[in-house]
Structures are given as C-alpha cells and as structure tokens.
Image (tube, coloured by chain):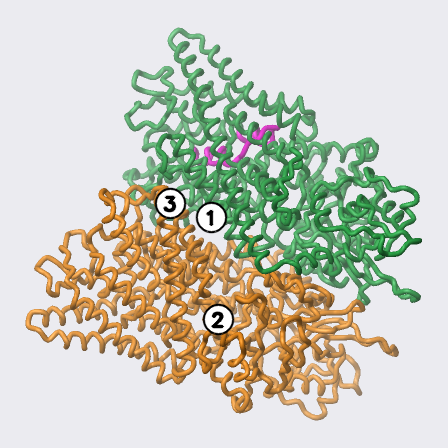
Chain colours: A orange, B green
Amino acid sequence: MANITKKVSWSSRTDESGAAGEGTPLLNGSEQPRLSRQQSGGGSIFQIGRLSTVDLEEEITSDEDSLRGRPKEIPHNEKLLSLKYESLDYDNIENQLFLEEERRMSHMGFRCLEISRWVVCGLIGFLTGLIACFIDIVVEQLAGIKYQVVKENIERFTEFGGLSISLILWAVLNSTFVMVGAIIVAFFEPIAAGSGIPQIKCYLNGVKIPRVVRLKTLVVKVCGVICSVVGGLAVGKEGPMIHSGAVVAAGVSQGRSTSLKRDFKIFEYFRRDTEKRDFVSAGAAAGVSAAFGAPVGGVLFSLEEGASFWNQMLTWRIFFASMISTFTLNFFLSIYHKNPGDLSNPGLINFGRFESESMAYNLYEIPLFIAMGALGGLLGALFNFLNYWLTIFRIRYIHRPCLQVMEAMLVAAVTATVSFTMIYFSNDCQPLGPEHTEEYPLQLFCADGEYNSMATAFFNTPERSVRSLFHNPAGTYNPLTLGLFTLTYFFLACWTYGLAVSAGVFIPSLLIGAAWGRLCGILLASITANGSIWADPGKYALIGAGAQLGGIVRMTLSLTVILVEATGNVTYGLPIMLVLMTAKIVGDYFEEGLYDIHIKLQSVPFLHWEAPATSHWLTAREVMSSPVTCLNRIEKVGTIVDILSNTSTNHNGFPVVVQITGSDEPAKLCGLILRSQLIVLLKHKVFVELARSRLTQRKLQLKDFRDAYPRFPPIQSIHVSQDERECMMDLTEFMNATPYTVPQDTSLPRVFKLFRALGLRHLVVVDDENRVIGLVTRKDLARYHLGKHGLEELQLAQT
Amino acid sequence: MANITKKVSWSSRTDESGAAGEGTPLLNGSEQPRLSRQQSGGGSIFQIGRLSTVDLEEEITSDEDSLRGRPKEIPHNEKLLSLKYESLDYDNIENQLFLEEERRMSHMGFRCLEISRWVVCGLIGFLTGLIACFIDIVVEQLAGIKYQVVKENIERFTEFGGLSISLILWAVLNSTFVMVGAIIVAFFEPIAAGSGIPQIKCYLNGVKIPRVVRLKTLVVKVCGVICSVVGGLAVGKEGPMIHSGAVVAAGVSQGRSTSLKRDFKIFEYFRRDTEKRDFVSAGAAAGVSAAFGAPVGGVLFSLEEGASFWNQMLTWRIFFASMISTFTLNFFLSIYHKNPGDLSNPGLINFGRFESESMAYNLYEIPLFIAMGALGGLLGALFNFLNYWLTIFRIRYIHRPCLQVMEAMLVAAVTATVSFTMIYFSNDCQPLGPEHTEEYPLQLFCADGEYNSMATAFFNTPERSVRSLFHNPAGTYNPLTLGLFTLTYFFLACWTYGLAVSAGVFIPSLLIGAAWGRLCGILLASITANGSIWADPGKYALIGAGAQLGGIVRMTLSLTVILVEATGNVTYGLPIMLVLMTAKIVGDYFEEGLYDIHIKLQSVPFLHWEAPATSHWLTAREVMSSPVTCLNRIEKVGTIVDILSNTSTNHNGFPVVVQITGSDEPAKLCGLILRSQLIVLLKHKVFVELARSRLTQRKLQLKDFRDAYPRFPPIQSIHVSQDERECMMDLTEFMNATPYTVPQDTSLPRVFKLFRALGLRHLVVVDDENRVIGLVTRKDLARYHLGKHGLEELQLAQT
C-alpha cells in the first residue's frame, strides 16, 4: 500500500513535467479522462487535457484547505480522484457470442456449472485454510525458537548483569526478520504491504487494483506476514489472510495461472469479471473465517464490502467456502497439536472460551459499556489521525524501497527496545501458578516461582497476549503495567501500520483495547467495595477490545458477528453491538475509518452505498463525461487503432452508433463495446476487406476473449499494417447490443442507484431520441462526496 | 392463508360465469392483464380478454399434467399466476414534487431523517419484543392452568378407572381454545392464518398482499396464536412473531393508524413503499430475533427474503431493531421470572445451553450428520407433499369459514385423543429424579416416584418438549416412545399446518426432528459397544431437529445462523450447515419448500433471485405486455377517467408520451405515472380549464399523496362532472420523468436483473427511437419458471 500512496504522491507532484517520462502512464486504465467539464452547481470549472491534471499549488493554497489548518506543503491526495484505476465489469457483456453460448447450453449444462462453482468454492476454502494453517505453524515455530533463544539469553545475563547484550540480540533478531519481510515487499511486490483489506474492499467495490490478486502477491504476502509477526512488530496475521483468501479465489476460479503460464483448461466459463468477483468474495470470506474462526462473519464481511449483489445461492456458496476454510484450519491444527479430530481451533486468533455464568453482564453495566465504546471511538480516531499524518509523511519522504526497508527495521528495533525497557523497569511480579498460560514466562528480577507480568504482554505473540488479557484471573496484571502497555503499544501499532511489511491491524487494536479495557475493569472493581463480583476484568477487556477495534476500522455488522463468533458465545451480542455502534458514531465525528483513509489517500474511485443525500440537484447531464468517442457499427480499422492509441483519450468503453443510410438524422445508440474487446478483435485480425465479400471476416469465439482475459495486451503491441488499416471491422456480433441507458435529466441518486445496484462500468446517457450525449463512469459518480461543508467535488487526476 | 388459496380456487372455477358477480374483482390490482400474446418459443398461444381466464378443463387434461399423475378434478393453481396482486414500488417516484422537496432539504434535514429512522427501528424492536413477551406469558399462564386441571383430573381417575372422562375434558378444553382462535381468524381476518411467513416473504419480495400489515391482522394474529398453542395443537408461536413484527413496523413507521383513524403527523416522509418496506424488513428481523433469540439470524432472514437491496446503514438499523427486540423480551421475561437483570431468555424458544465439552462432535460423526440431513430432506419432502395435497383438498372442499372452524376443532380433538391414547398405552416409566425438568409429570400407571415418559413429550408446550429432547440425560426416553411420537406428531403437524388458525411450523418441525434425531442417537449408541461416549442423544436430537426443519422450510444461511444462535454455541455451525445443505439438496429433488408451495398455490407473482438459467432466448419483446395504454403529457380528464374506469384494462402504470406539435413523428416516452397518482390528482381536481389560463391548476403537494397512501380510493368513488371531463390535466409535475427503460432486444435475464436489483414495478420497453412499445411488470417476469421439463410458462388469471 505504501507503494501505491507513494506513486500517487509522486506523480501528483511530478505530473506536470513528468507524465510522459513514466512510460505510458495514460494507458494504465482510466475510463474517461475529463475533456471538458461544465459548471456543475457549486463545482468549479476545470479543464483536463493531455497533461491537464490539477495544479497542485493552486489546490494547496485554496481557502478551504487553509481553513482546515493543514500545512501547505503536503499534497492533499484525498482531494483527488485518480484516473489510473480501471473498473471491473460486474454486468455481463451480453453480446451475440455470449447469448449464443447461453442459448446452446442445456439445463444440464447450467447444473454442471453450478456444481463446478461449488467445487471451486470448496477448493478456495480448503486452500485458504491450508495457508492459514501454514502461517500459523511457521509463525509458532519460528517465534518459539526466537523467544527461547532470547529467554535463555536474558536468564543467563539477569544474575550477573550485561542485559544490554540480550537487548541487542533481541533487537537484531527482530530487525533481521523484519528486514527480510520488508525487502520482499518493498522490492518485489509493494501491493502486498499492509493488511490488504483496503485493496480487497476496493476490488469488491468494483475497482481493479493492479496486481492485487496475483500469485506473486500471495507468496510475498504469506512470507511477509510470517516475517513481520516473528519479527515482533505490533502486527497481526489476520488481516493478510483476507487478502490471501482473495488471491487464492482469483487463482483457483480461473483454472490457470498466468504467472506460471499453466492453463488447466478448466473453469473457462468463469473467466470474466462477474464470476471472478463472486469467487473473490468467497475467498475474502474464507480468509476472515480462517483468521477469526468466524464463517458467518466472513460472509457478512464480503457482503458488507462487496455486495451490490445479494443472491441466495451465491451467499450460500460463500458460506460454504468459509465453513470449509475454518474446518480445514481446525482439522490440520488439531493434527499439529497432536489431538486429531478435536475441532476447537476454528481460527488463527482464538479468544478462548467465555463462560456465560462467570462473565454474564448485568443491565446496569450497559451504560458502562457504552462509555467504553465512546472511549474506543475517541482513541480510534486519534489512532487514525496520527496514522493519517504518518502516511502523508511517508508519501512525501519515505518512498524509495530501501528507505522503506530501513524504516521497517528501525521500527522493529525500537519495538524490541521499548519492550525490553518496559519489562526491565517493571516490577510487577506474579506467582507462577499451575494454571498460568504463559509459554515463555520471564523470571527476570522476580523471586523464584514468580514471573514478570509485563513480559507476558510483550514477550509473546500478540494473539497469546490478547487471550491472556481476556482470561487470566483477576489480579494477574497490575494497573500500572496495563496503563504503560496501552500507551506504548498504541504508538507502536500506529507507527507500524503503513510500513512496507505485510501485516494486519486487527490484533494490535484488540490488544490495545483489551489492555485498557482490563484496566477499566480493575479500576471499576477497585472503586466499588464489593466490586470483585461484577467487574470481571476479562469481560471488560473484551469490551475494550471491541471498542478499540471498532474505533479504528469502523466496520459494523460484520465486525459484531466476527467478535461474537470469536468469543464463541452469543450472549455478548448486544453489548458488542452497542459498543461498536458507539465507537463508530463517536469516531466518525472526528475522523474516518483507517481503511477509508488509506483508500482515499490512494485516490481510489470508491463508490459508497448511496449517493450523497444532498445531491438531488445534480443530474446525469452534469455528472456525465462528454463528448463521447463513438464508433460506427461497421468501422474502419484505422479509425479504431487511432482511437485506441490516442493517449489523451484512453477510454475503455465506446458506445456504438448506427447511422441510417441516406438519412441525415443523427446516429442512434445501438451498443457498447469495450477497449479490451477491440484489442482482441485487432489481435485476431477480424477484418472485412472491402474488396472481398463479407464472409472473409474471421469467426471469433468467446474462447478467444476468455484466453486473453484478464491481461489484455496494450494497443502498442499490436501491429496493424497500412493495408489492414483500410479494412473494415463489423462490431455487431461483439458489442453489447443492449447497454443500460438513462435519460439526461435523471438525478444523481437515481443514476448512482442503477450504477451501484448492477455493478456497472459504463452507463450511457441518451437524449429523448436515443442519441448518445454522454457516458457515466465510476469516477464521475465517485467524485461527489459529502464533506464537512456539504457536497464536495473531488478533482480528477491522471495519476 | 387458507382463505387466499380458497379464493383462488373458487374464482378459477367460477371465473367464466361469475367474475362479474364478485363485485369489482378486476379492480383489486393487476398491473397488466394480458391483451394479446405472441407465441414465445415453447409457450402456447392464448388470449386473455375481459373474462378470458384459463379454460380449466383444457388445462387439466393436458398431457403434461396427466404425465405427472395428478387426479384430473383438482385445479392446478400453481400453474396460474394471479393478476389480483399489486406490486410494491421499491423505486422512488422521482417526479418534480419529490425532487423539489429533496433539493430543499438541508444536510441537517437528512441527518434528522436518519435519526428518526433509528428511533423508528428502536420502537419497532421494543414493541415486537413486548408482543413476544405478552404472547409468552399469556400462553404459559393459560397452558399452566389447562395442564393443571387435566393433570388433576387424570390423577383422580387413574386409580378408580373412568379415564375417558379425562380424555373428554382434555379434548373439550383444547377444542374450545382452538375454536376461539379459528373463529377470529376465519371470520374476521383470514390473512392472519398460518405462520405468516409466506405472506411476509411475498411482501419483502415486493408483492402487496392485501391487508397483510394491518392492525386488525396483528390483533387477530396475536390472539389466534395464543389460542392455538394453548389449544394443544402441533404448532409453534415463533412463525407468527415474524408476521407480528412486520405489522408493528408497517404501523409505527407510518406515524398513524388508518384503522384507528389516528394520524400523529410524524414520520410523514416515510409514507411510501420504499421506506415502508425497509422498516418492514426490520420488523420481520425483530420478529425472528424475538422468536429465536437470534438477532443476526433475523437480519439474515430479512436479507435472504427481501433484499434486492443491501445497504450498510439499513442493515445496521435492521440489526439494531433485532437487538432491541431480543433485549426487550429478555428484560421483561427476566422480571416476569422474578430474576430481573438476568439476560438468559433471549427468545421465545430457548434451546437451552449446549456445553461444548459434553457435546463436542468428532470428525467421523460428520458423515452420520450428513446422512441425517438426507433423511431430514426426505421426511421434509414427504411432509410438504402431504401438506400440498391437503391444501388442495382444503381449497376444494373446506373453504367456508364455519367448515374451517370445524376442521380446526376436529384437529384439536384428534390431537388430544391421540396424545391421550399414546400416553395411556405407553408403559415407558422413568424415575422422577431431582433433576427432572418436567413441570407437569404424569404418574398415570407408573410406580410411585416415576412418571410417564411419553407424557413428557405430549403433555407440555412444544417448546418445553424440544428442550427436554435436547437436554434430558441419556436413557430418559426409550426408543419405542420416540418412534411412536415421531410418527404421530409428524402426521398431526402436517394436518395442522394450513388450518385457519395462527400458528407456525418451526417448533413442530424441530420437535419431530429432535425426536427421530434422539432416536438415531440412541440406536447408534446401542449398536456400538462403547457408544455411550460419543453418541450423546441430545446432540443427535439437535442435528435431527435441524435436518427436519431444513427439509421442510428449505431456508439456508439464515436458518443456520438462527439455529446456531438458538443453541448459543458456535461450535455446531459446521454440522448444522452441512445438515441443512444436505436436507435442502435432497428435499429440493422431490418437492419445493413448504412456504414456496403455499406461495405458488396462492398464485403469487413471486420473483426469485435470478431468471431461469435457460431463458436467454427470450427477449423483452416477447416478455412484455403490449399494447400499452399511454397518456399524453397534457391529457383530457375524461380520457383519464375512462382509462382508469375501464375494468378490462385495469393497468396501474401508464407511460406518458409527448407528441411534437405539428409533427407526424410518433410520440416519445417522457415519463411514467401511476394509477394511484392519477386518482389523487382527480380527487383534488387538479384540472386546467381550457378557457382560462394555465394558472388555475391547483398546486398539489407531496403531502396530498402521502395522506392518501397507502389506501387510495377506487376510481368509482371519485365523481367527475361532465364539465370537468372536458378539462385538461397537466401531468408534467407528477410523472416520474426518468423511468428506467430497456431496448426491446434485451434478454430476459438482463431485464430480470434490472427489475429485481432495483425493485421496480414497471419497466418500459422502448424501440431505438425511444417510442414505447411495451411494459414489463412483475407478472411478466414471474411467469417464466424452471420446471422439471425445462422452462415453463405460467398462465395469468384474473383471480
């Protein structure tokens, strides 16, 4: 992610001089660069041509920005919308070829397809579970070795002094692991940085993020997350599982690997955006399911993020993939833990068993929970705010891969040092009872038979720390330990998120929240005389964890269900919901959610659920891009090549029009064709030579399009001779003959609803004679958003 | 429900002679009666005019039907599609009035609206919870009195003989309760019969079922369900909660009661189908939540049944309503049980606590579970098949209210008799241990300190019986008891569903399944030597209950989550999912789900998720209704009145066209107006007198439309004088100026997707010059469905 944001920043700072220097930057996507724009209500007039991206200086010095008190030198990427992202086409391209194939297919054929969808979902779940299992085992082994080495070292030096050597050993070990993780991410696959959740959100929303679902990304992600977790960073391995699941899904469902150049000739029917996105939803759900042991939460995550669709069978399949995923993980972990058949490890993070009796809540605790929710919202907003500034800083100054690696190593060393210092100066000794859950108890300066409590929190994988905060009996931690731990871990986690390593923010958030939640519980118990009965610190740790996580990521229903499933006890449904709701309301008042901030900083044209409420005064006429480049139904090859090669108007969809012969009436819309389709047609030389008969047009099949999907070659790689340029191309068979259209007076919310509900990529605006007057694309809709001062219009940039 | 099906049958048998005799049967709805129909592929040509419903004799003797072996005299209602049902308009009518209002509204205004939506959802949840609480307490009190009386009576007569008096007492008590329940349903509000789930499914699908969300229906439903449960029928009180929640939602959200003639002048913004349906979703979810203590399951139920929409905020609100509902129920029940603050009664049915340790399942049990799922599917299909025939029988012979009451009383008496006989002849005595959960243990002929085990199953509310089947220790029931119980209860439940009483099928299904599931567990334990360890009968009872319920209702994700939430333990997620999946697959092979059968028998134009897979060869041209009655933008009042009064073409939506003055070009589409809007316009005399200036047209406001919603008067009640008939009416302001359109070549799946995704009511089909050539409505799409022999076309009838 760091790389994306970097690129955005880089080009928004250099675009005026350097766009041509970036190779073919304008070919990387962008449905509809703005050619001219009418004044739309409160918006400003601006022209974007070949290099006409936004003048940054002007932007920075505008009134509104200085009003908001931001330093002038920082580029406001969140005020831009990048044109470099393409959209996915969730709407089927119903051209003649497609319809013929569908009509040929028998009832039995559709049934077989349905069965293979189930098989694919089962495979996705299975493989995702396996990957989660692999990550878990490798992390546990490596971290075990690391902690064992450091523990022995610390014990050796505790008595006779010289603990600084232990510190150095620890810091070096951590930095080494993190270095490996950062190098593969920064140098080989920058998209694998971070948790991957913002990228998957975008993908499910319908934005094609380059390279996000490639095999290489998966490999780097898996290795990277192992390195960063073992390297002791304040990160979790759960977020990356969602990304991993999505990549597995995108790979398996296509029946081939473009990276490995292997085509298994299966699942060819699924080689289009519609089907692929359905499978990616299943993969993301399987990832959530494997990460948290939350199959229903996984389904809800996919639906919450992705769905303009909700189809009973699809949802059921997604649920199947989720179930298989958690089951696979569970099964293999049970074998690994030498207890085969015991299905009690449903996810990577296990909250442990919450018993209803011991931890029941009472009515009068609800206001306390809500207050904790508000606190979580505040802390979450603070976290997001700090991380926002840090990301801006990174975009400006830490954009070279080697710098990124060095920053990651620095964070690793600092984390180790801070942890060590905290442990060293802590004198919170606890008896090493028979029920202790610490695997690596550090005695340090404690008496024999006791261990250092602060070390429990730091000297452990974060997952274990969360669990001990939830379940260790009251009195295990003293308040000072928890307070210090919250404080340090908060800043460490904030600094860590956004580094060029693969790592998630779920577990650190839970850990911070659990720490201050437990602190709340202890304080509550201490201020009431007989408090020990009701204020079980574990319960408050759980509520705090929910509040903090909700305050940072701002997910709603899916997060509630994920947490409920992770606790394994539905009793906590109501308090968790109330807490998440409060955290979201309070947090949203100050700052957006962490994922949304990062999506915005990448200038992704992300479509929300609904058009801004106050946008009814905008109509399709004001929103659309115009003029539109149209093609004739039978078009000259030369014209097509020229249009496709024109880097200033690198459109991706072209309305096809028909001119009634011998009439001077304007041309009517008769279809829509995509750039990718034209490229395939050009590549296969589907030309009609004028001199010869119509029959010479080569018959192209759907298979040819599917083989080229999804990496269509650029127009530059296709050679068209001068003779061929004079030929004609008949688009009738290939165009979508029935594109969705709207009249020009349609209000923005109505256009938005149609676009979002059907997952469109292009929506043709026609006048009352069915003539094309404009085209609405994702960027045209994503531009309008509700800011603090009412409706705002983002600006489009070729970056 | 019985009444609806009856009506359908009645009129399809009499329509040729009696349609005119039914008062104004043709005014009750129906968007687009078929005027002429082209031959569409494999379909047959048929003409439906004024009285041209399907010739029943011809229908019955057709080849296909005799092939399927059905008796010839029974009308095949499921082959018809009724035209009497109107659709809901989930698409906003964006006319000028609406847009002006939206544009006037500030950002703050929208925020207030959003807050009031939350308030309404909270109210819905609260009231639904209260209703559930009321039902629960009343049922418990009344049933307690009844069982106490009968128990004392039986005990009195056991020693000295004369038990037949007890039997008569029992039967008379039961019949009396059931009689009351049946009388209010059959005579006052027939729509309140049954569980109400099919009706709510239809409503959420977008079909307006008359009277389904009225206050009277709610009252009858609540009283009816109390009577039928206390009357000892094989029914549950859970299904009706869903209907009750929906009615509460429809009432509260409108801020007035049309029945009580009270208008609180609040929530006026919500007086349209779009908003109302959202709230009804929340109400249904709250109902599920109260019934099963399953808030997430409730949300999923609403989404599974309703959603062409999935909007994050809406879903979150629905979840809020669900949570409030289960919380309210929980809270008031805790007060009732004299344990305030103890939140352990989340739903009406409580599966009791399943402990993970004692009831963990192992890997090798999965195939057993799947086999049980298959058995559940088979038994479910058998249940549905029998109930289908029974319903057909009822439609033909038991359609008069008094007959319905008598049948209900007969069932009540037979249930009592059978129960009594079973108890009498059972000699399964069990020791009355200290941990027994029976509230009314019957000693009968058992030794002192023992009780009759068969009586446990029958002499209890079904909810308690389910719980004891799940949790009673192994050995409580002997296999013969369970086998006999399963058999009798299966047929009793099957007979009971569809009676003219308010009652659900969830609990009987669970009970049947739990009984044979427990039987399976016992048998498995007995055939293996050391079986007692793994084959805990309670676990198998749970699996059996899931299998049976899944086999009958065929719900998927929502049912899984409901069951998991009801058990309070997520460990059972995977087995329950597998079991439900197997049950659905096996069951679907033989027969549809129970709710779908009843929906079909009512000839409701229900839209499934997708168009039939093999329907790509159909296009909008073949599907649409044509010719269409169009109106001019400025139309003569007389013409409008005539069109609306024309009972042979009782359309509900009219495309508005504009003719360019002085041109002979055909008219272009410029808008769409609804019958209800025209009626309001006529009522308010919004006319332009030709002689005077344009300005005399009375200014109408959105409020006038909202006041009339949803019970618009029929056209007959509006008097238009001969002078007024000569006036003109300007529709410009009131029509939806930007209706969605499709070209005539659009394939059926594409039309379907648009229609379903946006929740449309009318979709205009235009040619390439934007001239209206047809109109697609819900019935046009619902007609095509996938039968056993490929794509089938249902016939439309004015019934």
For this rendering, which residue is in front, B434 or B145?
B145
- For residue B296, which numbered disc appears in the image? 1
In the rendered image, which residue does mark 2 sit on? Answer: A599
Q: Quadrant of residue B105?
A: bottom right
Cα distance between the residues tagged 1 and 3 = 12 Å
SS at mark 3?
Answer: helix
Residue contact between numbered discs 1 and 2, judged by CB atoms under 8 Å: no
SS at mark 2?
Answer: helix
Residue contact between numbered discs 1 and 3, judged by CB atoms under 8 Å: no
Q: Quadrant of residue A171?
A: bottom left
The region drawn magenta spans: B493-516
Quarter that holds the N terminus of chain B: top right
In the rendered image, residue B50, in percent from the top left (x then y), is placed at: 85, 41
- For residue A571, which numbered disc appears in the image? 3
Question: The disc numbered 1 marks a residue on which chain?
Answer: B
Amino acid at pointer 1: Val
Report the residue at 51% width, 28% height from top.
B234
SS at mark 1?
Answer: helix
